[in-house]
Amino acid sequence: MSVQDNRVHEAIHWLYESYQRAKSFHQNRLIQSGGFSVDEDVFARPDREIRHPEWTEVLLDEFGRPERSAYNVAVTGSKGKGSHAVLIAGMLQKLGLRVGLFTGPHLIDFMERFRVNGLVMPEADFVTYVNRVRAKAAGLDLPEGEYIGPVGLLAVVAALWFRDKNTDVNVFELGRGALHDDVNRVWHQGAIVTPVFMEHLLQLGPTLADVGREKAAVVTSDTRWVWTGSQSPEVLDHLRQRAQATGAWLGQMGKQAHFTVTALDREGQRVIQVQDEWGRALLRVSRSLLPENVSTAAAAARCVWRDVRSQTPWPDELDLTDLVIPGRFQVVRQEPLTLVDGTIHRSSAHHVMQWLEEQFARTSVSDNRKAGVSNRPFVGAVLGLPADKDGMGMLEELEGRVDWLGFAKTHNPYLKFNHTWISLADAHFPEVAEFDYVEQALKHAEQRVGKQGILLVLGTQSFVADALACLQVDTRAVWRGV
């Protein structure tokens, strides 16, 4: 390991020291009282009981609120946060703005979390900024048992770097919530709420309404506008209440804006038209990008543009065909045609199946399976689904279209896998196989599918990261050819 690698490793290790000290404190107290087993996670409790995002705000204050040097947009939700963040950042960069992008977690390279105009933060810069934050944090007097969230420390690092890089706009992806999320303490004028599902119920729940209340807090007293796409009534109610209480303007795709899609089969692209009260916007994108994600991000980008470049008209068309979202609906190989996506529930699996049907149509091969004729490409899928994901919904979406199914675990030791989804799949799919990890599964899948087939690699983010590393995909790049 090089000296630079050692410094990066040490910097990353420090980010988690405050959290680990607090965890050890509470664990020791509970063990002494006889109310805790060493197999339990002491912090598997509601965020409102254990998180202290106010310390992130204290640090931002200590540095003079570096994020206020630019226009900021916060992104929260359950699915597609990273995609929306990359999309709006890419659009604004294409419009000529200098854009900072903070996302997380990373897939392979820790530096993926920080980008300016699509380029990741150099490791030497990362070490320098972490050391600056570390020196300031050392002066804070935290009560015993409280901690500064690692993601909050990273958000401060990002804000400092963005300020020094003279960004015009910054996009910050939040963690699992908003009300008790450290990143939400970053001052932001705009917000995006992606579809909210029943997730992280121990920390945010126990009901969908509770999760919605946590996420809706992305709308702060400083937030001017918030955009959202499809939402359940419970979540939408909380967004409306929050917007009304803060005076923010709320826009929903399908209400305040609409979109239409034109597929260009020959070029493998889509043209998406977004129509809102300010007129029409055309966006040319890769076929792999989901239209609702693109249109919601475009509606938000237009709000930013009106605020920062009010005298300059939005262009007739914006070409984003060279934009890549690593690990999110990403085509990584052509032979076999291989799609990698963080699919963990029915809704996202449905989008994957729509993409698959488009591939059948593009090759002029129809699915005649029900007629007893199968002249479409052979389809294989490798799934990495922990026990707490919507495996039932995913399998029901894949049934009838996937010919070979492989299951594998991720190298992340904190995720729990069992045989539930494998047992269900055995009764509904022609061929089902089980492997230890994605490396073995991909090797077998590529042989089974063949060069002319289609391979889907779907699962939780840790699994996607393992797959991309195995396939040697560059996760640092969000623009093709850069």
Image (tube, grey):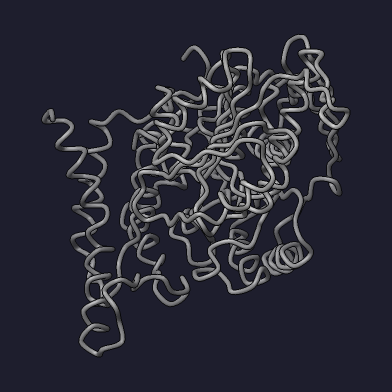
The residue closer to the viewer here, 25 or 69, is: 25
Q: Is residue 255 above or below residue 286?
A: below
The residue closer to the viewer here, 275 or 103, is: 103
Q: Which quadrant is the N terminus positioned in?
A: top left
Q: Is residue 31 left or right of residue 234?
A: left
**Quadrant of residue 59 in the image?**
bottom left
The residue closer to the viewer here, 40 or 121, is: 40
Residue extending farthest left: 3
The x, y position of residue 92, in whole percent, is 61, 29
Q: Is residue 49 above or below residue 213?
A: below
Residue drawn at point x = 70 percent, y = 69 percent: 245
Residue drawn at point x = 12 percent, y = 28 percent: 2
The x, y position of residue 36, in whole percent, is 30, 81
The x, y position of residue 296, in whole percent, is 72, 40
Residue drawn at point x = 61 percent, y = 39 percent: 84
**Quadrant of residue 314 in the image?**
top right
Q: Is residue 93 above or below residue 208?
A: above
Q: Is residue 83 left or right of residue 369?
A: left
The residue closer to the viewer here, 144 or 99, is: 144
